[in-house]
Image (cartoon, rainbow, N blue to C red):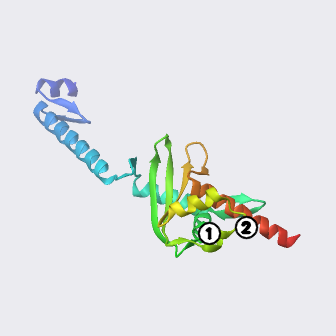
Amino acid sequence: RYEAEQRAKGLVEFEGKWMTPDKKMAIQKELSREQKEQKEQEKNKRKRINGKQEVGSDRKSEIIYYLSNNKYVYRDIGATYIELSVTYSLDYENPKFIGWDVVTDPNNPMAVLATAKFKTTGVYAEILNAPEVSYSIKEKMKEAVPLLSITWRINDFIGLKITPYNFYAKDAISVYKEIVNGLWKLTE
């Protein structure tokens, strides 16, 4: 009965309240404007990095947390992905950590790419002269100077999976394995 009385007065129900059709339209326009403005602000917050979409600051913090609290384990010895990145940067002269870039993976929108960036002045001569280091690895290392970018792929859609994405992350794991193997030899 109350509904019929309200309709007889020319009112309409909107979000649990009775109002004139004009007021309803004004509220809807304002909500639409606010939604558009919010989307535009979100869009402007995101930056383009090398054609890839940067993720929001909350997501970036979460990804860096993953990298600092999850370990790559080899022969029962583990190191966080941040430790792997920093240790690998020590093969370069004067490594200075610049920061992290975290962007969506262009090949998999459910994953992100986290890049630890270091400014360097060169590759240590000991590395370039080491006979056990292949020529192709030495050339790749020279290419990295003056900006070393170690990129990890993080996919947490179904469980957490962190994998090396670029040459430098793959080489960081190789160097870590060599370090662990050296430790094992010392204990034998």
Residue on which disc 1 sits? 87
Type of the residue with mark 2: Ile
Q: In screen coordinates, is 5 left or right of 172?
A: left
- Residue 71: in sight, yes or no? no
Q: Horizontal and vertical percent for residue 183?
A: 79, 70
Type of the residue with mark 1: Thr
Q: Are marks 2 and 1 in contact (CB under 8 Å)?
A: yes
6 shown above or below 153: above
Q: Please name whichever residue, 1 or 89, is drawn nearer the observer in this view of the structure.
A: 89
What residue appears at the point 58 percent right and 64 percent down from the top-left corner?
A: 85
Residue on which disc 2 sits? 179
> Marks 2/1: CA distance?
10 Å
Q: Horizontal and vertical percent for residue 80?
A: 63, 63
Q: In screen coordinates, is 181 left or right of 104?
A: right
Placement of the C terminus among the 4 image quadrants: bottom right
What residue appears at the point 17 percent right and 38 percent down from the top-left corner?
A: 29
What residue appears at the point 66 percent right and 70 percent down from the top-left corner?
A: 129
Q: In screen coordinates, is 122 left or right of 76?
A: left
